[in-house]
Image (spheres, rainbow, N blue to C red):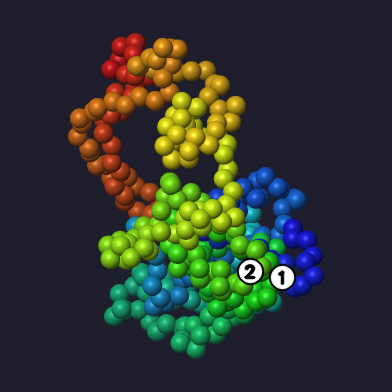
Amino acid sequence: MQQWTGDSKNQIIFCGPSNRSVDLVARLVIDKLGSKAPPIVIMYGSAIEQLTYPIPGRASVSRRNIRDAKADTYLVENGVVLHNIIRQDGKPYAARLKELDKQISDDVSMIEEMDKSTRGPLKTTIEDIKEYKDIQSKATKEELPKYDVIFCTTSLVANPKVLKATKDRVYQLIIDESGMCSEPSTIVPIIATSAKQIVLIGDHKQLRPIITCKEAARLGLGTSLFERYSRNHLYKTMLKEQYRMHPKICEFPSKHFYDGELRTHPGVGTSPKLQMWPHTIDGHCPHVFCHIEGDEQTLTVKTEAGNEQSKFNDAEVKQVVINLFPNNHYL
């Protein structure tokens, strides 16, 4: 939790370019800190909220993107998702919100299930939807100030509801994966929150902003604010110890991208070694490059988001198995 700083700024906003990046950190806070965690809340955009609480006539997330867009189940179960919190019993606007939720849900079901020529009149009026949105806005603005840490995407930080609820309250703004955030998407939350302290976290040598417009990329939009600061060595701190790669694999990126500064934690690579071809002098090779020519196949897989296309290559699978288990006689 934030220490008293002598002014009213006492909240932290943790944001990132995607819901997934933010959800991951929120889950870690709950898992690692448990009961010692500060009060946190996750705020999703209206597109995700409308997956649970749809509004007639409003655009919804496409089935193709529903898996990436839906609220994190673990966070929902832990009761830290804002659009569910404002509907909890005892909250000032919960009763009316749930009443309108039921009415609107019935109308949405009628629209989806019945032919227009046979269905009856909808109960929900334009005035009802306006009231619904007004109540949501009021509930959000009254609820957000109660939390020490607010998790959301960089684009949502500048939402008027967030700005009004956190005005003059944000002490620290943390932008995760900022190496892949475009400069405008980083600058907007910095200016909007007037935070006293800004922390940018990322690695522009792994992922940079995805800019589809060639002219915009040529003019520099592909360079993040994080990268600009890194180039000038302004307030830069490098985390030099990694836990993900075997030391032998780490040698290459460390030498060619990180000036030899990237080190491997002593505990990495100490597990029993797989005997893989080809062997090095010491009898072990942590990585293998194999040339495989196979046909990519497509399989239709049924998921909660609908039918999706999954691609696979049998030749690649068989080669991996051969490398791992050279004495397997069933191949």
Secondary structure beneath dot 1 equals: loop
Amino acid under label 1? Lys
Q: Position of residue 170 (x, y in %)?
A: 66, 69
Around disc 1, counting alpha carbons within 10 Å, would you say few (fewer than 14), some (14 to 19), or many (20 or more)? some
Q: Mark 2 sits on what residue?
A: 195
Q: Do labels 2 and 1 touch, CB within 8 Å?
A: yes
Residue 71 in sight here: no
Around disc 2, counting alpha carbons within 10 Å, would you say few (fewer than 14), some (14 to 19), or many (20 or more)? many
Amino acid under label 2? Ala
Viewport quadrant of the N terminus: bottom right
User: How many numbered circles does the render carry?
Assistant: 2
Mark 2 → mark 1, Cα distance in angstroms: 8 Å
Q: Position of residue 292 (x, y in %)?
A: 23, 28
Question: Residue 81: which quarter of the image?
Answer: bottom right
Q: Is residue 204 left or right of residue 271?
A: left
Q: Is residue 291 left or right of residue 146?
A: left
**Label drawn at residue 242:** none
Residue 130 in sight here: yes
**Residue sitting at x 47%, y 83%:** 124
**Residue sitting at x 63%, y 69%:** 195
Question: Residue 132: which quarter of the image?
Answer: bottom right
Viewport quadrant of the C terminus: top left
Q: Nearer the viewer, residue 214 or 166?
A: 214
Q: Is residue 305 left or right of residue 142?
A: left
In the image, residue 165 above or below residue 299:
below
In the image, residue 244 above or below residue 199:
above
In the image, residue 38 above or below residue 85:
above
**Which badge, 2 or 1, is on the more N-terminal residue?**
1
**Label drawn at residue 9:** 1
